[in-house]
Image: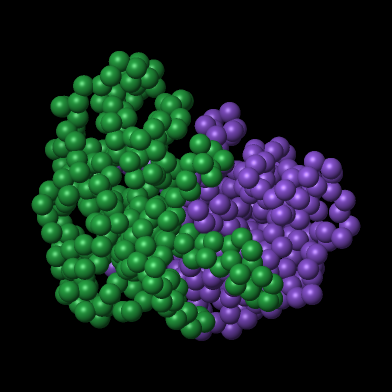
Chain colours: A green, B purple
Amino acid sequence: MSTDRSRPPSPGRPIQLVALDGIPEIVEGDDLGAIIGNAIQRSAHVLPMAVDDVLVVTQKIVSKAEGAVVDLTSVVPRPEVVEFAERWDRDARQLEVVLREARRVVRMANGVLITETSHGFVCANGGIDASNVGPASGSIVTLLPVDPDRSAAAIRAAVRARFGVDVPVIVSDSFGRPWRWGIVDVAIGVSGLLPLEDLRGASDADGRIMRSTVRAVADELASAAELALGKAAGRPVALIRGAIITRGEATIRDALIPRENDLFP
Amino acid sequence: MSTDRSRPPSPGRPIQLVALDGIPEIVEGDDLGAIIGNAIQRSAHVLPMAVDDVLVVTQKIVSKAEGAVVDLTSVVPRPEVVEFAERWDRDARQLEVVLREARRVVRMANGVLITETSHGFVCANGGIDASNVGPASGSIVTLLPVDPDRSAAAIRAAVRARFGVDVPVIVSDSFGRPWRWGIVDVAIGVSGLLPLEDLRGASDADGRIMRSTVRAVADELASAAELALGKAAGRPVALIRGAIITRGEATIRDALIPRENDLFP
């Protein structure tokens, strides 16, 4: 794993979060790298691209471009799902898709279905979502991309080819958390940056050794990007300028706790 | 609960994350509102204060100013803690303090002690931390502030009195999460903004009703602020300019899932 720690921004220099404008409705087969490149090209705020830029691309448009969608009208839910869905006023066909995409069920109670996906993500509804899938598509849901790291790498390669700058890319999605209401955006795919910033052994401002500080920087970048995008604004790509990240080739799997190490299996 | 939704920033306008410089080492009894006001006053980047500013203040300096610290040399750990600490190479006195501050133990395994604090936060080590507590203070740990909402309100009042602008304040801390390595900053106290942005019933970009989208905006703001602060930089206060928030009088308890509703009790 090669790493190259970017220089810290000078004190007081702001980090900027910018939502890219001009991303059209995405459909299967769209060249997302080209479309994001066009949006960058048209944005006076972000050109020229900078060495401390990071792009955050929300899962929904990645899934749509890659055809990772399911038409619920074709789905026949299994009986136990029908019962659960009726009891909790959920769409049984959507829950059936969640189970099909799952490696295992973590919790299924209170109307909530939490699974571990094939990628290893533990999340509600397997990351499957019906909102923002396009007009007149009431029965279409998006799945998670098959390989979100690869999706991020493809966008990164397209941006590098077009602008000559190697900009790390994060694919993000909105996850709930135990104990706290509300969703936050986290990273589900990365390319060009390490998802974790390992400060163990570094000394803090007083020279004290910080033993257990591993910062989930890709998740913090995803959450920050969400502030610029909003959930209902039709702006699915954000550019973050000036954040401290560690460049390197990595996978989001580096950020996932193996089941045997987790206290909430 | 009075609310006043701030106007969305115009498209393409960046959100800015700025670390305030010039916050000195904080000691018990310090007037944090005055100290943060001084830091604002000296920062050309952030003056004049704006109506869409949010201040994020990290827990450590709040606890230190409020004297929410314990000297471990005065702590005698109970026997079961000594055994756990020896097995997992932890400081038994610190774990004893975690238990004293806890409402209940959620998990105690693999060297990790997860408790519910008196505030209702579920987190590792009860939010008690030994890093960044000041030079030559090897045995001092910080506790969480007694009432982080009140701490936030006091800083907000001081800023309003000095600059004539009502700036919402978040007190943040770094929490781990199940299933994902690494810590992210979340809100542990709020004043002047709602910690949750409830988009249920709002329509998304396609006019589809989003049924279950409650965004943990205070947590996302805390995570974004952390990007500007870093963990080892000695900069404990960030200003976020241009984010969409909903103003209102609230408490961080609004963001906590009651135990009876949680799937991971």
Where, by quadrant of the figure, is residue A92 drawn? Answer: top left
For residue B154, side relative to residue A244 (left or right): right
In the image, residue B168 sits, relative to residue A8, either above or below, namely: above
Q: In the rendered image, is residue B202 in sight?
A: yes
Where, by quadrant of the figure, is residue A221 drawn? Answer: bottom left
Q: Nearer the viewer, residue B207 or B103?
A: B103
Q: Nearer the viewer, residue B241 or A160?
A: A160
Q: Nearer the viewer, residue A149 or B88?
A: B88
The residue drawn where x is 36% and y is 58% is: A251
For residue A264, side relative to residue A113 (left or right): right
The residue drawn where x is 46% and y is 30% is: A107
How far across and down, in percent of the image, does residue A47 sit? 24, 78
- The quarter of the rendered structure image containing the N terminus of chain B is top right
How far across and down, in percent of the image, does residue A138 sit? 19, 34
The residue drawn where x is 17% and y is 49% is: A66
How far across and down, in percent of the image, does residue A86 sit? 34, 18
In the image, residue A69 sits, relative to residue B73, either above or below, namely: above
For residue B54, side relative to residue A130 (left or right): right
In the image, residue A133 sits, relative to residue A190, either above or below, namely: above
- The quarter of the rendered structure image containing the C terminus of chain B is top right
How far across and down, in percent of the image, does residue B240 sit? 48, 67
Q: In the rendered image, is residue B162 in sight?
A: no
In the image, residue B55 sits, relative to residue A72, either above or below, namely: below
Q: Please state the total of marks drawn on the protein image.
A: 0
The residue drawn where x is 69% and y is 38% is: B105
